[in-house]
Amino acid sequence: MDQTEHTAQGDKPFGKRLLQLVLSITVMTLVTVVVGYGGGLLLFISAKLGGPDPETEGGDLLRDRLLDWPDRNREFMHNNARGEFPWPP
């Protein structure tokens, strides 16, 4: 079969199929990078620009208290949660 018979049967030439494949991979890679890193960047920017920074009843920042929570309750967790829970987040 020659090139005209392939085209007449609905097959695309190899060069065109290869170009479509490369173009698809390029577009999907760019979309994945923009959506993936763009979403993280958007969250980072929105956190830096402001918004609510909740505080606990004691006046501590909630984010600081949540970061300290595992260290302060490590002994309770190592005892398979037996005993009194020392400090809620």
Image (tube, helix red, strand yellow):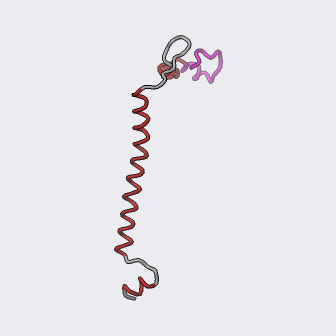
The answer to if 50 sits in the magenta stretch is no
Which SS does the magenta portion mostly show? Answer: loop
Residue 87, above or below 10? above
Q: How many marks?
A: 0
- Corner quadrant of residue 26: bottom left
The answer to if 77 sits in the magenta stretch is yes
Q: Residue at x 43, y 46 (%)?
A: 35
Residue 29, above or below 36? below
Q: Is residue 79 left or right of residue 63?
A: right
Q: Residue furthest right?
A: 83
- Corner quadrant of residue 58: top right
Between 78 and 89, the one nearer to me in the picture: 89
Could you say where residue 75 lies in the image, as x and y percent from the top left? 56, 19
Residue 31, above or below 8? above
Q: Is residue 40 left or right of residue 58?
A: left
Q: Residue at x 64, y 15 (%)?
A: 84
Q: Residue at x 43, y 45 (%)?
A: 36
Q: Residue at x 43, y 32 (%)?
A: 46
- Corner quadrant of residue 85: top right
Between 64 and 46, the one nearer to me in the picture: 46
Residue 54, above or below 7? above
Could you say where residue 63 lies in the image, as x and y percent from the top left? 48, 22
Where does the N terminus fall, quadrant-wise? bottom left
Residue numbers of the magenta segment: 73-89
Where does the C terminus fall, quadrant-wise? top right
